[in-house]
Image: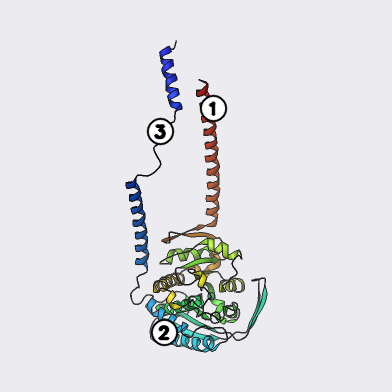
């Protein structure tokens, strides 16, 4: 038989438990807040330090942003370079040919050969852009530069930039800086002491802004196009800052993997790809031409900072930091070197299938995984959310019925 004193004690205990324990104020003490703030500032300082260390100008023999900067200043010094103007067709073409010839002469004794071809294609194509239209072009300019081992190569990467600009802009970021980076990457690769496995075609195209014509002329008419297996396109949607990988594919996950593995300062976002390929942004790049008319996969990179001065007279060389050039050059050079030694380039169809999810973490590193893994993660997150909410509902209803028991007691 239970003791009535025990019963009374138990009852008192239950009644005491009915009162919630006193919760201490959620506000942090002053010292804790100061410590948290200091920790945050230290973390920011550390991140800035890491990114600055990554951008230190490298030693001779590597990518040299100061040399690339000189090219940028020379190319933009003539002002706007609209297609058909003497500035675009004569002055800039002569400057580029002169620089390429200097690199060729300098690297003559190395393990690679350089061949230059100036192409003036005429043609037309229909494009499903801005509501769809047909574009006709007549003798636009392409400077194609082939670098390959002296023993010859079967498979080639294509690196593309355009040196023309819109009518009212010196086009420093769009896209003279990319052509300057490509000249310096060509210089670095030509001066390697060991031969690469595959070759690379550098295409300095002279008609992108009205619209995507020179790249079409190259990929549909130039004999070297048959040997191109993949491409890297250097573009701008802003002025300066970091260059971001905002489109890859179609499919061919090995290209994203190569970028993630090889880029010295990787920065990429699959969100950009989703937005850009949805057609929301009324802009396009040579990426579309190589994908749709050349059926080759690629990586599309663009400078994205200060988008509000893109295609304006304010797109000047002073607005592009030398660090930005160094960063872009380090990335392009390392990714090209990696791809030019890879097995995938020789037989890309074998590695074709699959898409990738990719994004950067605080600008320090890039995470990439197959899209099917992403689907699994999404399903798991959805199931975990349902289980969690279900448990929470059950606990709430249990607690309510428990309180009812207490109150009735
Ligand atoms: Zn452009």
The residue drawn where x is 48% and y is 67% is 244
Identify the mark nearer the N-term, 1 or 3: 3
Badge 1 local density, few (<14 within 10 Å), some, or many (20+)?
few
Vertical side of 292 occupied by 270: above or below: above
Residue nearest the viewer, comparing 240 with 12: 12
The residue under label 3 is: 22
The residue under label 1 is: 401
Foreground disc of the pair 1, 3 = 3
The residue under label 2 is: 103
Cα separation between marks 1 and 2? 83 Å
Cα separation between marks 1 and 3? 22 Å
Q: Position of residue 363 (x, y in %)?
A: 43, 61
* Residue 237 in view: no
Q: Position of residue 305 (x, y in %)?
A: 47, 68
Q: Exactly how many numbered labels are in the figure?
A: 3
Q: Marks 2 and 1: in contact by CB < 8 Å?
A: no
Identify the mark nearer the N-term, 2 or 3: 3
Residue nearest the viewer, comparing 182 with 153: 182
Secondary structure under tag 2 reads helix
Identify the mark nearer the N-term, 1 or 2: 2
Mark 3 residue's CB less than 8 Å from ligand 1? no
* Residue 122 in view: yes
Secondary structure under tag 1 reads helix
Foreground disc of the pair 2, 3 = 3
């Amino acid at each position: 038989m239970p003791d009535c004193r025990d019963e009374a004690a138990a009852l008192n205990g239950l009644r005491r438990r009915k009162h919630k324990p006193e919760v201490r104020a959620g506000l942090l003490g002053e010292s804790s807040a100061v410590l948290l703030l200091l920790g945050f500032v230290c973390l920011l300082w550390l991140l800035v330090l890491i990114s600055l260390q990554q951008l230190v100008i490298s030693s001779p023999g590597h990518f040299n942003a100061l040399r690339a900067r000189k090219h940028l200043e020379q190319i933009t010094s003539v002002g706007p370079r609209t297609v058909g103007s003497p500035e675009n067709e004569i002055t800039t073409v002569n400057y580029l040919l002169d620089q390429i010839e200097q690199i060729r002469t300098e690297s003559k004794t190395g393990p690679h050969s350089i061949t230059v071809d100036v192409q003036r294609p005429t043609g037309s194509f229909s494009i499903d852009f801005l509501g769809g239209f047909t574009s006709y072009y007549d003798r636009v300019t392409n400077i194609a530069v082939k670098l390959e081992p002296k023993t010859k190569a079967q498979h080639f990467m294509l690196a593309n930039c355009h040196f023309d600009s819109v009518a009212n802009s010196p086009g420093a970021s769009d896209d003279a800086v990319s052509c300057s980076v490509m000249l310096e990457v060509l210089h670095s690769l030509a001066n390697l002491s060991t031969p690469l496995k595959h070759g690379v075609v550098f295409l300095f195209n002279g008609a992108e802004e009205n619209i995507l014509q020179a790249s079409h002329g190259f990929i549909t008419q130039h004999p070297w196009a048959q040997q191109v297996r993949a491409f890297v396109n250097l573009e701008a949607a802003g002025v300066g800052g970091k260059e971001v990988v905002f489109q890859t594919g179609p499919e061919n996950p090995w290209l994203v993997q190569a970028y993630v593995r090889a880029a010295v300062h990787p920065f990429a976002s699959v969100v950009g790809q989703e937005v850009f390929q949805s057609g929301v942004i009324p802009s396009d790049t040579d990426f579309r031409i190589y994908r749709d008319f050349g059926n080759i996969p690629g990586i599309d990179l663009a400078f994205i900072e200060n988008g509000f001065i893109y295609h304006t007279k304010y797109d000047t060389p002073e607005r592009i930091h030398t660090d930005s050039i160094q960063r872009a050059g380090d990335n392009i050079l390392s990714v090209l070197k990696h791809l030019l030694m890879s097995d995938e380039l020789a037989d890309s169809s074998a590695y074709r299938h699959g898409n990738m999810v990719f994004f950067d973490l605080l600008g320090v590193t890039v995470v990439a995984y197959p899209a099917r893994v992403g689907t699994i993660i999404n399903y798991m997150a959805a199931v975990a959310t349902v289980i969690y909410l279900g448990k929470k509902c059950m606990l709430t209803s249990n607690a309510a019925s428990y309180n009812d028991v207490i109150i009735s007691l």
